[in-house]
Image (cartoon, helix red, strand yellow):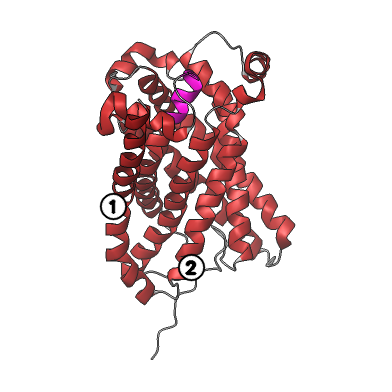
């Protein structure tokens, strides 16, 4: 009833937001002072990174919503659509542009918060580890273990804010008549499944997002560092905005394709458990089978690569605009000279 929906709407705002950000506040309050004291980076530096991350993630995912709609429908109704082009044509014919933009707003909300935490905390956690390392050499490339740890933890925090909105998006795409608007759908889902039910997709979303994010950052930052390192070796220190954009574009494409393949099974399981509430992750895997875990894989690869490239283009552009070096662009590491 309307009163219940209003109550749930109010309750979800009171309850979800503290849950989303509790872990973030605990980590930030314990690590931020030490990072700032041990580096030349202040609060404004990290505020810019959080803002850049939220901006690039929300805009990139919003721009590729039609692709995501086709991918989701291919997963919930296997065999109906032959591919991306066929899916776009059929959905547009039956529901118009509105059908291709189903789930637009929960995508914006979810990825604004997820992107802010993912990118901001990734940079923050790396800096916090460097601040505690007495052997750290400024300008040196982060180790693989650092990137894995920072990427995994940052994504866990980000996914905690994303999963309710992703549940709403999937329900809006798979069952358009379920509700109208993001918070109306969230209210109904809470009414049906309880608050805990909103996070039933957290294990599969972590199974998808953590490998995806770790792979994305490792591949992108490693490739970017290799390219900029080679340019420094050739005494090419000023490549301009166009050159930097080209590096971002190339590294982003490779990172997007790799991350898509690694995280495809988790994405399929996430869609399945949201389509069939009460299904466990092992149950979904058994039902889908190995081949089924890659349903919509080609379409999703296009989708993921598209928004990964767009994200890095926006993120790096903002960082350059505010005077922050992009990933891999740090000056060559030099060990301090020993005083005799």
Badge count: 2
Q: Secondary structure at mark 1?
A: helix
Q: Are marks 2 and 1 in contact (CB under 8 Å)?
A: no
Where residue 40 sits: x, y (%)?
Answer: 45, 76
* For marks 2 and 1 on the same chain, the one whose residue lies earlier in the sequence: 1
**268, 184: nearer the viewer:** 184
Q: Quadrant of the N terminus?
A: top left
Q: Quadrant of the C terminus?
A: bottom left
Give the crowd class for mark 2: few <14, some 14-19, many >=20 residues within 10 Å. Answer: some
- Quadrant of res 332: bottom right
Outermost residue on the top side: it is 79
Question: Is any part of residue 295 visible from this angle?
Answer: no
Residue 22 tag number: 1
Q: Residue at x 33, y 51 (%)?
A: 21
Where residue 224 sits: x, y (%)?
Answer: 57, 53
Side of 120 relative to 3 (left or right): right
- Quadrant of res 241: bottom right
The residue beneath circle 2 is 45
Q: Residue at x 65, y 61 (%)?
A: 231
Where residue 22 sits: x, y (%)?
Answer: 28, 52
**233, 285: nearer the viewer:** 285
Where residue 105 sits: x, y (%)?
Answer: 52, 36
Q: Residue at x 45, y 41 (%)?
A: 110
Side of 96 relative to 290 (left or right): right
**182, 209: nearer the viewer:** 182
- Relative vertical location of residue 37 with respect to residue 228 in this rendering, above or below: below
Q: Main secondary structure of the magenta part?
A: helix
Give the crowd class for mark 1: few <14, some 14-19, many >=20 residues within 10 Å. Answer: few
Residue segment shown in magenta: 167-177
- Relative vertical location of residue 274 with respect to residue 211 in this rendering, above or below: above
| Marks 2/1: CA–CA distance | 22 Å
């Amino acid at each position: 009833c309307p009163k219940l929906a209003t109550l749930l709407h109010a309750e979800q705002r009171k309850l979800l937001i503290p849950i989303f950000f509790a872990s973030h506040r605990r980590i930030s309050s314990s690590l931020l002072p030490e990072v700032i004291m041990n580096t030349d980076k202040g609060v404004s530096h990290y505020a810019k990174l959080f803002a850049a991350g939220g901006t690039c993630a929300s805009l990139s995912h919003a721009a590729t919503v039609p692709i995501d709609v086709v991918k989701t429908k291919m997963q919930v109704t296997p065999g109906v659509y032959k591919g991306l082009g066929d899916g776009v044509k059929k959905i547009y014919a039956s529901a118009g542009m509105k059908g291709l933009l189903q789930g637009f707003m929960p995508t914006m909300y979810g990825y604004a918060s997820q992107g802010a935490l993912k990118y901001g905390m990734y940079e923050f956690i790396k800096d916090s580890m460097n601040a505690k390392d007495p052997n750290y050499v400024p300008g040196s490339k982060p180790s693989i273990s650092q990137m894995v740890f920072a990427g995994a933890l940052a994504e866990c925090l980000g996914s905690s804010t994303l999963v309710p909105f992703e549940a709403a998006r999937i329900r809006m795409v798979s069952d358009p008549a379920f509700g109208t608007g993001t918070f109306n759908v969230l209210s109904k889902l809470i009414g049906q499944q309880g608050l805990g039910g909103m996070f039933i997709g957290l294990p599969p979303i972590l199974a998808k997002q953590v490998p995806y994010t770790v792979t994305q950052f490792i591949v992108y930052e490693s490739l970017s560092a290799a390219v900029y390192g080679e340019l420094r070796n050739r005494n090419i220190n000023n490549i301009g905005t166009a050159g930097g954009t080209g590096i971002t574009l190339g590294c982003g494409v490779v990172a997007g394709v790799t991350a898509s393949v690694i995280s495809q099974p988790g994405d399929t399981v996430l869609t399945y458990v949201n389509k069939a509430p009460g299904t466990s992750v092992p149950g979904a895997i058994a039902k889908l089978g190995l081949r089924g875990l890659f349903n919509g894989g080609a379409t999703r690869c296009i989708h993921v690569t598209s928004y990964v490239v767009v994200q890095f283009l926006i993120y790096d552009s903002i960082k350059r605009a505010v005077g922050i070096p992009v990933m891999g662009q740090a000056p060559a590491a030099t060990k301090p000279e020993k005083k005799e």
